[in-house]
Image (spheres, grey):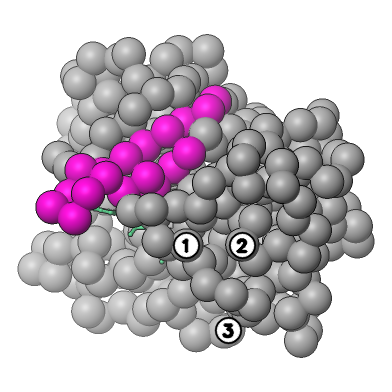
Amino acid sequence: MLRVENLVTRFHTYDGVVRALEGVSFEVREGEIFGLVGETGCGKSVTTYSTLRLLPSTGRVHSGRITLSGESLLDASESRMREVRGGEIAMIFQDPLSALNPVMRVGDQIAESVWLHDDLPDADAVAVRVEEVLGEVRMPDPAGAARAFPHELSGGMQQRVMIAMALAGRPKMLIADEPTTALDVTIQSQVLQLLRQLKQEAGLTVLLITHDLGVVAELCDRVAVMYAGTIVETAPVEELFSDPKHPYTQGLLAALPGASETLAPVPGRVPDLLAPPSGCRFHPRCPLAVDRCRAEAPELRGDTRQVACHEVEP
Ligand SMILES: Nc1ncnc2c1ncn2[C@@H]1O[C@H](COP(=O)(O)OP(=O)(O)OP(=O)(O)O)[C@@H](O)[C@H]1O
Ligand SMILES: [Mg+2]
């Protein structure tokens, strides 16, 4: 459904050119939950902002291709992109309160998304649709929630409202950027369960962005591991955990005390993307590095399992 090929995105800053993404490729298939996982600053959010063409003015997609069901998003007009955002690819963010309008009733905020993307005859039909969407996200009292202001709802309920707003436009795909980081553990698992139900019952396709391997294990079908603006490995989730191929992925998994812990860094530091390492960006931290790794960036090779490493076969 969504295919990203060799995406290169850079920021032009006073300090120089930040080489944020250097050839990112992955594919999200219809009806799956695809995880994009990696340490802070590795380029997860820049990947989604590039996809939706929401980069700040200093950021530019330098090269690459992004297609949604075959349509090139980098070549689409700005008015077409406004339809795509929310109508075909909806996004939910980390902090629900900052994305909700505090002085507007929840139902009216969802109604705005409905008006924008749905062709309904009148306000009554919109109100019905608003309650329907709140029901889809398992809001306990949809009519009551629609009349509430955001601060009157708990954090988990606010996150449900965010997901309802995203689903109101009947998108093909949902991009969830760290949707559970700001939530406590119980609410986090409720939101994850909701995403799973939406996938199973409504066939929703999800690109889930997280730094939490526990979330990946619990929810995703396939996963791509990012490191310093590159994809180092792509795999079905069970295979990634049972047989990690890339030295970086192996380090991440070895550093996990339990299956549901947040990523612990591999020895060494994440590189400065103003002056990234030559060749493979992981080579300064890699136990397997040879001369070739310093000179030449490895391509992502393989089929169902993909690895970007000179020393490892996919
Ligand atoms: N506006 C910007 N100007 C310059 N550099 C930027 C800008 N936005 C992001 N970057 C750089 O791009 C890289 C990737 O950032 P990004 O926000 O995508 O990371 P992330 O993987 O989403 O991290 P996190 O887990 O903290 O959300 C970082 O090195 C960051 O410093
Ligand atoms: Mg981010």
218 sits to left or right of 228: right
Sequence order check, earlier mark of 3 and 1: 3
Kindly report the distance in space between the C-alpha atoms of the residues bearing marks 1 and 2: 9 Å
Report the residue that reaches farthest toward the left.
103
Kindly report the distance in space between the C-alpha atoms of the residues bearing marks 3 and 2: 39 Å
Residue 72, percent across and down?
Answer: 42, 15
Q: Which residue is mark 2?
A: 284
> Can you say which quadrant of the picture contains the N terminus?
top right
Q: Nearer the viewer, mark 1 or mark 2?
A: 2
Sequence order check, earlier mark of 3 and 2: 3
Packing grade of label 1 (10 A; few <14, some 14-19, many >=20) is: some
Amino acid marked by disc 3: Thr
Q: Is residue 295 visible?
A: yes
Amino acid marked by disc 2: Pro
Amino acid marked by disc 1: Pro
Residue 246, percent across and down?
Answer: 78, 53
Q: Residue drawn 14% across and 70% down?
A: 102
Q: Residue drawn 17% across and 49% down?
A: 13
Kindly report the distance in space between the C-alpha atoms of the residues bearing marks 3 and 1: 35 Å
> Can you say which quadrant of the picture contains the C terminus?
top right
Q: Which residue is mark 1?
A: 271
Q: Main secondary structure of the magenta part?
A: strand
Q: Is residue 84 above or below residue 307?
A: above
